[in-house]
Amino acid sequence: MTNRKSREGAPRARGGRLPPHTDLNLLRTFLAVHRSGSLTAAAPLLALSQPTVTTHIRVLEQQTGHCLFTRSSRGMEPTAYAQELVGLLTGPLDAIAALEGQSRAFSDDTVPLHLAGPAELLATRALPALAPLVADGLRLRVVTGLTDPLLEDLRVGRHDLVISTRRPRGRSLTSVPLADEEFVLVTAPIWADHVAGRLSADGACAAVREIPLVAYAENLPIVRRYWQTVFGKRLTASAAVTAPDLRAVSSTVVAGAGYSVLPRYLCQDELASGRLVALDDPQEPPINTVYLTERSTDDTHPDITRVRERLLDAARAW
């Protein structure tokens, strides 16, 4: 399926070996195409659209550095390398399918839906909202990460839905607004009491100079944006603590380590109980819209519609 030029730059897999960390979904698609003899016939076996099946095969060819199929009047003819892979993969993949309780290697009614997004939003909002669907038979596979790499994986079919922190560009993906994250400048009561005088006299921007900063990343993306939006100033502080999970940032601030800027949904219980204190109450707090994003082709999974609708409905209360 690939031409010579597209294969020349790829790292070639020797013999029947595969590159490390090859996506299992790509291998399942490859085996389904081999067994069914065509991209069109493989698509319903996998509950995928034909363009997604085509993309999976192309990605696997790029990763292995080998052409896997050639077109003929009889359908998709496997290459010699593909035949080697079939011998290696058939037993393990069918064994996995059997362990999953499937009656055959590829069942169109039990294929998991692949959902990806920020760890914090998935853990505290999205996955609890999907619990009733899981009880009703939905199977989920969840991946967490940053928006840009997740969107790239969505384009090549590794995910079905991505909760993204920005609207993607281009026509290959389509998105709808899911929710607005409102950001809050917070600290523990002990620090709020410590700077109460300066907070009253000079405001939050000056008062927090006496408090250590706890942040998501070294470049302080969330805190810097708050400073620019609310105070109209460039942030000059550096972090005392960084943790790549906003739940860890929240718990560290609650414990008294310093101050931070957090999404309100993630700290509203702590604010209500008094374990955190808001240091500022701007008229227009910074917000960031998160989007529910999928490929622009037809639905690639039988459960994609009800998952999308369930998340959109639940997000009204977030």
Image (spheres, rainbow, N blue to C red):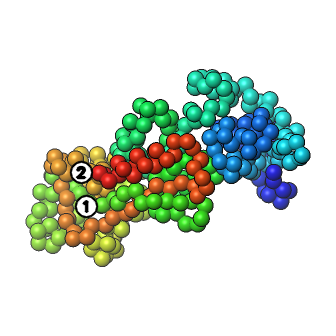
Looking at the rendering, which quadrant does residue 211 occupy?
bottom left
Contact flag, marks 1 and 2 (Cβ < 8 Å): no
* Residue 251 placement, left or right of 79: left
Q: Which residue is mark 1?
A: 185
Q: Nearer the viewer, residue 304 or 55?
A: 304
Residue 230 to residue 99: above or below: below
Q: Residue furthest bottom?
A: 232
Q: Identify the residue at image location x=11%, y=68%.
A: 200
Q: Residue at x 79, y 57 (%)?
A: 6
- The kind of residue on which mark 1 rests is Leu
Q: Is 161 placed left or right of 4 in the picture?
A: left
Nearer to me, 291 or 204: 291
Residue type at numbered disc 2: Gln
Of all residues, the one furthest to the right in this rendering is 73
Label 2 element class: helix
- Mark 1 or 2, nearer chain start: 1
Residue 70 on image: x %, y %: 86, 47
Task: Name above or below for residue 100 compared with residue 152.
Answer: above
Image location (x, y in percent) of residue 60: 73, 46
The image quadrant of residue 201 is bottom left
Name the front one of labels 1 and 2: 2
In this view of the protein, can residue 254 be seen by the observer? yes
Identify the residue under disc 2: 268
The location of residue 63, given as percent across then percent down, is: 73, 48
Q: Which mark is residue 5?
A: none
Instruction: Give the image location of residue 87, x and y in percent.
Output: 80, 29
Query: Horizontal placement of 128 versus 34: left or right?
Result: left
Q: CA distance from mark 1 to mark 2?
A: 12 Å
Q: Nearer the viewer, residue 42 or 256?
A: 42
206 to 62, vertically: above or below: below
